Image: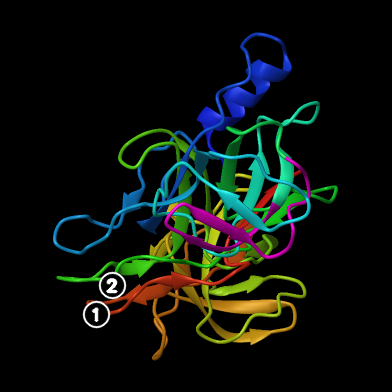
């Protein structure tokens, strides 16, 4: 299910139950998927790196300062420039005591070793070599669920060759290649909604859906229910289908956009349905994602 991977869930639970120490703060890379798999981290189709100019983007990590800084200035001198820090990233000081991870500010510019925040630093450094972490995400807030959205926009290299394909989901990894999948989700910040569909029908009951014709949608029974069997098309494996002739409390489900190719159920079913966003990235196009494009939630 979209959200924490098995690796992350097990790591958190083992820490909370006193079985293993807290893991080292990870460097984090953003991946793009054209098809999704399971929370075990298998079955995902990541954009190919072969002749496309695609590579995962680093969106969080650590860099050390090389001089002390104060609350009277937005300027911090760093030991190096890693190249992946972009404006809008949140900055935290993991050396500062008694509150490791204290918020320092938001990146305005980072040229050479000169880091400039959007305002004066929120805290003074512990010393002259404080370790600073950078992330496109600010600290989570809220309850039921707690959530965070990226505040920094990110851009990949312009696609070459066959392009990136049609991207439907994203994930966070702890390595630039391979590594452990930490979290994943579909593009588009939309809620899962319950649905029911009878036999020999393409009309699904989805109360208050707010969907429009040709919206891409995916189905799951992971929250409960049983997906219907179909003689045309499929709902399993998060296959992307499309909305046709939506009403306030119902949608027809087609396998394609444009001229209708409706699914045909051979059994009734129920579960959850969610609208998603698809992004086609052909050669010559730069895949860019604005602030609030990626949302992380945890109940």
Q: Write down the residue under mark 1.
A: 284
Q: Residues within 10 Å of mark 2 (few under 14, many from 20)?
A: some
Q: Quadrant of the C terminus?
A: top right
**Which range is magenta?**
105-124
| Residue 70, visible in the rendered structure | yes
Give the quadrant of residue 14: top right
Of labels 2 and 1, earlier in sequence is 2
Q: Residue 137, position in %: x, y? A: 63, 53
Q: Secondary structure at mark 2?
A: loop
Seen in the picture, residue 209 relative to 102 is either above or below; the reply is below
Residue 158's label in the rendered image is 2
Residue 129's label in the rendered image is none
Q: Contact, CB < 8 Å: mark 2 with mark 1?
A: yes
Among all residues in the image, which is located at the extreme bottom? Answer: 259
Mark 2 and mark 1: span between their CA atoms? 6 Å
Q: Residue at x 44, y 78 (%)?
A: 262
């Amino acid at each position: 299910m979209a959200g924490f991977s098995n690796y992350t869930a097990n790591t958190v639970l083992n820490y909370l139950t006193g079985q293993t120490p807290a893991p080292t703060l990870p460097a984090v890379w953003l991946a793009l998927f054209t098809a999704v798999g399971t929370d075990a981290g298998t079955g995902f189709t990541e954009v190919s790196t072969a002749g496309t100019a695609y590579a995962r983007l680093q969106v969080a990590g650590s860099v050390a300062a090389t001089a002390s800084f104060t609350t009277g200035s937005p300027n911090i001198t760093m030991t190096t420039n890693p190249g992946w820090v972009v404006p809008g990233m949140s900055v935290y000081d993991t050396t500062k005591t008694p509150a490791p991870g204290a918020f320092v500010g938001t990146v305005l510019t980072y040229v050479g070793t000169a880091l400039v925040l959007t305002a004066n630093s929120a805290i003074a450094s512990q010393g002259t070599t404080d370790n600073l972490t950078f992330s496109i995400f600010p600290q989570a807030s809220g309850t039921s669920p707690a959530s965070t959205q990226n505040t920094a926009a990110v851009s990949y290299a312009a696609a070459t060759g066959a392009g990136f394909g049609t991207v439907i989901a994203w994930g966070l990894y702890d390595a630039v290649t391979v590594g452990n999948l930490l979290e994943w989700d579909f593009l588009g910040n939309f809620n899962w909604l319950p649905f029911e569909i009878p036999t020999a029908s393409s009309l699904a009951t989805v109360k208050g859906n707010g969907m429009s014709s040709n919206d891409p949608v995916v189905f799951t029974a992971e929250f409960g229910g049983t997906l219907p069997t179909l003689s045309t098309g499929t709902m399993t494996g998060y296959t992307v289908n499309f909305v046709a002739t939506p009403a306030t409390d119902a949608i027809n489900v087609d396998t394609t956009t444009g001229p209708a190719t409706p699914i045909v159920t051979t059994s009734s079913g129920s579960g959850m349905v969610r609208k998603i966003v698809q992004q086609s990235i052909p050669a010559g196009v730069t895949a860019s994602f604005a602030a609030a494009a990626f949302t992380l939630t945890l109940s």
